[in-house]
Each structure stands twice: as structure tokens, then as C-alpha cells.
Image: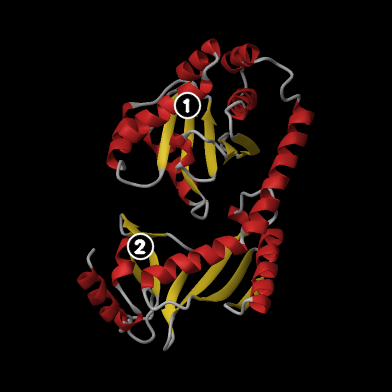
Amino acid sequence: MNAEEARAILEAGAEDEEPVGLPPDVLDELTIADVPAGVSVQVGSYKDGVLHLEWEGRLTKDEEQVIGEADYTWTRKYWYSPLGLEHYLDLVRRAVEVRQKEHGDVELIHFEDDGAVIRMVFMVHSGEKNLGKAFHHVKSVCEELEEAAEDAADQVGRLVAELAGRVSGWGSRDLDALVVAVERATSADERGRSLEELVGRLFEAVPGFTVTGRIRTATEEIDIAILNGSDDPRFRRESAILLAECKNWSDKCGKDEFVLFKEKIENRSNRCSIGFLISWNGFKSTVTKEMLRGSRETTLVVPMSGKEIRSAIRYNNFADVLASCWQQAVNT
């Protein structure tokens, strides 16, 4: 989309109450003069007719500047952080109130908790007339306001993971014994737990990686959250949070599982750009086709099979194998 097309969309938006969706790369060419009165802008990219947001909120304007209206409407049912949603947003709300008092460039508008959904809305005054500069400023302020909540979530995640490991005997078996357990497990629960521990311990051994939490769902899917503090240039360019999901099925993993995992990555409020999908028995050809179809997208899913995991353990080079799988996924 070019600037002229964006201006036409903004002009047409004056007749509609819904926000206008624009990609981030066109914003630098637009100013508040291009935004009709009453029109708001959501920033994101369209995929299959759906706007995938770069930021939870919308841009509006007054007579002097672009204003960001941050809208955090989150549901407890779909909240995955080890820190409760009410505690997380309470920390963000406190940060907003402090900044409002000290800097005066933010303003808390609304905070409501109905037991199932929590909604918090606050305004960020950018002081900018250019939409691109305003968007980057507003997004940066929002990320700063969430820093304390993110730190708390990380600390809780590490504590829960440590306690869970103690209870379940995490680390009591060596890696070779875990491989045997993965391959000989008879129940779905045992297959999941053994592969989860194996993968988690391998990621923990990578310099700069910290496993902060493990989530098991009713469908036997396992998420491993990893803090990315790597100095490796290949991983340093990725997001601060990485996800890994393990599938120890008798069959190969297919396109549907790949797409669902990719959606999980995208639903982490723009804090995750990459995930490792580990399928002990490999992948169907439909996964490669899906990777080719989405090769231009920013979200990266890196497939890893049991064969690669066993090789990494055999030669004690998981970090190298991980980097090789990342390179293959990038080049697909």
C-alpha cells in the first residue's frame, strides 16, 4: 500500500464508525492532516481478510498531535501467563498512574473487571504530527509501562517452573534415559511429560536461554516459554520470548498442528516472533508446503524432529542443531 491509497482509505473511513486498518510501513508518509476528523487508525497487516494488529489500540488526533488510545481488553480464559491477568494489568495500571502524575503524557480513561474480562484503556499523547513517529512513540511508551508486569510474570514463571520440577523429579534422569522414556512411554501423559522434560532441559543448556514456564493443555499440547538472552546473532534478532511445543505422537505432525502453533505465537501480544515445533516422529509434507506459503511473514515456526533431537544428544551439540534448524526454516 502506498501513501495515496492510504489517504483514500482514510477519507472513506470518515463515513464509517469502524477504525481504519493501515500497515506500519506507510505511516511515515502520513500526517494528522491526512486523517479526517473522527477517524481512528489501527496498525497492522491483513492476512486472509483479517487484520493482525501490531499494537493493542488505535491512533486518533486532536488539533495539535497524534494520540494513541491503548485498549487492553483481555479474557481470563485465554490468559496463559503464570502471573494472573488481574495482577498483570494492575501493575500496568499503577505504572500508567505514576507516569500520568510524573510526565503528564498518559491518561487512564477506563478500568473494568467483570470477572471474565478485564478492560483497561489509557491515552498516550505523542507530541507528534507524523503518524509513523507517533506510532513508534506510543508503542514504546506502552512497552515501558508493561516492563514491571513483564518482569513479575518472568519471576513467577521461573518460580513455578522450579517448584514443578522439584515435585515431578525434574532433572533426576540423564538425557539418554529421557530419550528411552520418550520412546517407551505407553500413556499420553507419560509421553508428554518425558518429551517436555527432555526438550526443556536441552533449551536450558543453550547459552542465554532461560526456561520460564511450561503449560500443558487438555489436548496434550505442551508449551515451553523461553526467555531469549542469547548472544548468538541468529537468535539475538528474534523476540525476547520464544515458545516450544512438543508432540510425541505415533503419527507425524501435519499442517493443522503447524498452523495452530503459529497462531499461538501470534497471540502472545506481539512479544513472540518465533516458536520451535518439536514432533518426535517427524512431519508430513503439508508442513513444508505451509512454510513455503507463509515464507514472507514475520512469524517463524522452526520444525524439529526426534531424529534431530537424538543427534544433538548423541554429539552434545543441541545449540548447533537448533541454529541449523533455524537456518533451514528461514531459508524455506
Q: Which residue is mark 1?
A: 322
Residue 76 visible in rendering:
yes
Amino acid at the residue labelled 2: Pro
Q: Position of residue 66 (x, y in %)?
A: 43, 78
Which quarter of the rendering shows the C terminus?
top left
Task: Please name the residue shown 39% across and 78% down the image.
Answer: 129
Task: Please name the residue shown 46% across and 16% down the image.
Answer: 307
**Res. 24 mark:** 2
Task: Please name the residue shown 61% across and 18% down the image.
Answer: 186
**Is 85 placed left or right of 259 in the picture?**
right
Q: Quadrant of residue 189?
A: top right
Q: Nearer the viewer, residue 191 or 297?
A: 297
Amino acid at the residue labelled 1: Leu
Q: Nearer the viewer, residue 140 or 252?
A: 140
Give the mark nearer the N terminus: 2 vs 1.
Answer: 2
Q: Quadrant of residue 23?
A: bottom left
Which quarter of the rendering shows the N terminus?
bottom left
Q: Nearer the viewer, residue 139 or 51?
A: 139
Label 1 element class: helix
Q: Position of residue 297 (x, y in %)?
A: 34, 47
Label 2 element class: helix
In the picture shown, does residue 103 fall above or below 152? below
**Res. 97 mark:** none
Q: Residues within 10 Å of mark 2 (few under 14, many from 20)?
A: some
